[in-house]
Amino acid sequence: MKGLIRKHLPTLLLTLFLVLIMNLFIWQIGVVASPSMAPTVDEKALIVGNRLSYLNDDPQRGDVVIFTKDNRLLVKRVIGIPGDHIFFKGGRVYLNGEILEEPYLLEQDSTYSPRYEFYLAADKYFLMGDNRKVSNDSRRWNVPTIQRDEISSKVVLFF
């Protein structure tokens, strides 16, 4: 038994080291703590984010991202990017004067906000959960936008 452990210990340690490095610099793995992204990503789903996705590119509208807010990792969808004007009317989201088409929502006319409109400055992103009735997101935060450097990865896999 000792011989078997000694024989495979270097391989096991190397594997563990590589997994740790990949988790620190390439992948971000977590569990969704709320139903705010349902039906796209269910509560308690395991998610995998790619930290390299935004190395040379910025987050795009529609991306599902992992970010930091109040020292917590959260998952939401990018709705607005720098320079956008967002407002709410009749349960719909308007982006730069046009209705935002959101095929990922179960209920199309269910998006309401305590604030009527938002203008996004440079380096600011507006994020919302897909389950609009329960999501605590940019519509409800005291500081409604997230800075680019608070977005750590793009969700590439969930199950």
Image: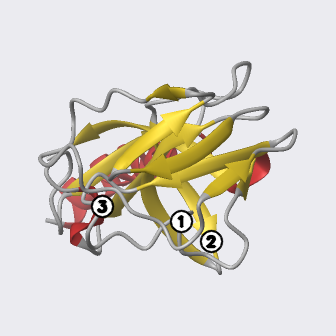
Tell me the mark number nearer the camera, choosing from 1 and 2: 1
Tell me the mark number nearer the camera, choosing from 2 and 3: 3
Query: For numbered disc 2, what is the local secondary structure?
Result: strand
Q: Amino acid at mark 1?
A: Arg
Q: Any mark on residue 139, and which?
A: 1
Q: Amino acid at mark 3?
A: Arg
**Residue placed at 73% from the left, 72% from the top?**
143
Q: Amino acid at mark 2?
A: Lys
- Local crowd at mark 3 within 10 Å, few (<14), some, or many (≥20)? many
Residue 82 placed where, x, y %?
76, 35
Residue 34 placed where, x, y %?
26, 74
Indicate the quadrant where residue 51 lies.
Answer: top right
121 to the left or right of 31: right
**Mark 2 touches mark 3? (CB < 8 Å):** no
**Mark 1 touches mark 2? (CB < 8 Å):** no
Earlier-in-chain disc, 2 versus 3: 2
Q: Which residue is mark 2?
A: 69
Q: Which residue is mark 3?
A: 132
